[in-house]
Image (cartoon, helix red, strand yellow):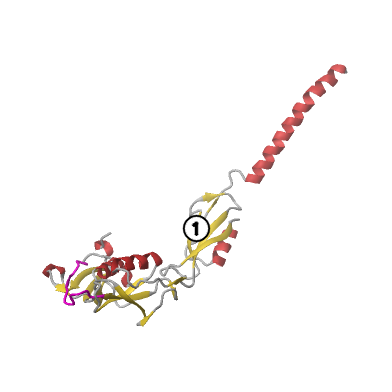
Amino acid sequence: MPGRRSLFLLLAPVALAALVVLASWWWMAGYTRHNVQVKVPDLQSMTFEEAVQALEALDLRAEVIDSVYAEEAPKASVVDQDPDSGKFVKPDRTVYLVMNATQPKMLNMPDLVNLSKRQALSVMEILGLKVAAVEYRPDPCMDCVVAQLYKGQAIAPDSRIRKGEAITLVLGQGQHGGEQVPVPDLRGMAYAEMKAVLAMASLNLGLVVEVQGCGNSGCDTALATVVRQFPSPDTEEMISPGGMVDVWLSMDTTSATP
């Protein structure tokens, strides 16, 4: 009997420890759902409610962490997610969403007057404002901003304006009103790049004469590239600042330059 009692006292702690280890392993396996994974679905273009339903069906959760404004994406829809679609995660994981705002963000109109054309364009690009047109009027300072217009009316600094709106820059002609500027070569450029190059050259977009490959259903010219222009840069023709350049576009984007 004493021998059995001693053996029991010796083995009991070992058995208890083994039981605790097995119980802990079993609990951890259940808690972490070892080897249980779900595939994150593609939530792009879904509303928040649709994304929540799609995730809850997979025992996942949704949380909005930011919003942006993208014209090409549906309003109030998912434009980005983390983790990305196709990734495998544990159940009960939170998927973080970036939503597309229903309206562009509001910002304060900058004071562009007395800035150079290059400075003004840089400020507008940083803030997300577009160039509606470039106009010239007599002023001693060549290519200095003498006025900023929104929908034909002067807009004061710090006025509230939506991001993405277009501003007309009125620039000075300098001492020599008859100065001419060269016509840039726009061929092969994407639409947005072409508009930026014209603005830097103190010129405006004239007529969009034709959009090849568009058909009768209409299409988004923002996705087109320039295949022809008038005046042509091959003639080395010079035109007045603020002049118009007509373009022919194509939906074949393989010719677009970076």
Eyeballing the image, is 91 above or below 105? above
Residue 246 spot, x, y in % from top left: 22, 75
Badge 1 density bin: few <14, some 14–19, many ≥20, Cα 10 Å:
many
Q: Quadrant of residue 147?
A: bottom left
* Disc 1 residue type (three-letter): Gln
Q: Position of residue 5 (x, y in %)?
A: 85, 21
Q: Is residue 27 left or right of residue 206?
A: right
Name the one closer to the observer, 203 or 82. 203
Horizontal side, residue 17 vs residue 156: left or right: right
* SS at badge 1: strand
Q: Give the residue drawn at x 52%, y 60%.
A: 97
The residue closer to the viewer here, 245 or 160, is 160
Q: Is residue 165 visible?
A: yes
Q: Would residue 246 appear left or right of 28 to someone viewing this image?
A: left
In depth, the one of 27 and 154 nearer the eye is: 154
* Total marks placed: 1
Query: Is residue 219 visible to the viewer in this orientation of the structure?
Result: no
- Characterize the magenta stretch by its predominant secondary structure: loop
Q: Residue at x 48, y 53 (%)?
A: 86
